[in-house]
Image (cartoon, rainbow, N blue to C red):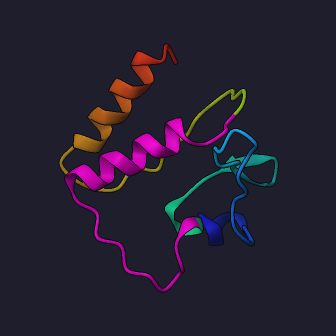
Amino acid sequence: MRTLLGLRGQPRMGPDRRLRPMEAHRLKAMSMGVLVDAETAMIWRGPIVMSAITQMLAEVEWGALDVLVVDMPPGTGDAQIAIARACGSRGR
């Protein structure tokens, strides 16, 4: 995401202690890639993936969105189910 959109720097914290998404080309974006050092290896498994997805949905100050695009990690589908449940419970 950082390279694709040309994002620079780190996301900022809003007054309500939620992360503000980064913006480029009139798009709001958030990624683990902007939260950790580019050289840091990430190991994504079950609960860690679902926790990260939940944080990206609930702890980022997205504001009003027309569309939310989620780039999902490959896997068994647990992450996709978690996203569907989280979005369905919020009426999105």
Does the magenta-highlighted stretch encompass residue 13?
Answer: no
**Position of residue 66 measured from the top left corner of the image (x, y, whole percent):** 69, 26
Q: Quadrant of the N terminus?
A: bottom right
Q: Is residue 27 above or below residue 85?
A: below
**Position of residue 68 measured from the top left corner of the image (x, y, whole percent):** 58, 35
**Position of residue 6 measured from the top left corner of the image (x, y, whole percent):** 73, 69
The structure residue drawn at horizontal position 65% and vertical position 45%, both measured from the top left corner, is 17
Q: Is residue 76 above or below residue 24?
A: above
Number of marks in picture: 0
Q: Is residue 61 above or below residue 32?
A: above
The structure residue drawn at horizontal position 74% and vertical position 47%, both measured from the top left corner, is 27
> Picture quarter containing residue 85?
top left
Q: Farthest bottom residue?
A: 39
Q: Farthest top residue?
A: 91
Residue 57 as seen in the image, left or right of residue 34: left
> Picture quarter containing residue 60?
top right
**Residues in magenta?**
35-62
> Picture quarter containing residue 31?
bottom right
Pick the residue in front: 6 or 12: 12
Residue 86 as seen in the image, left or right of residue 79: right
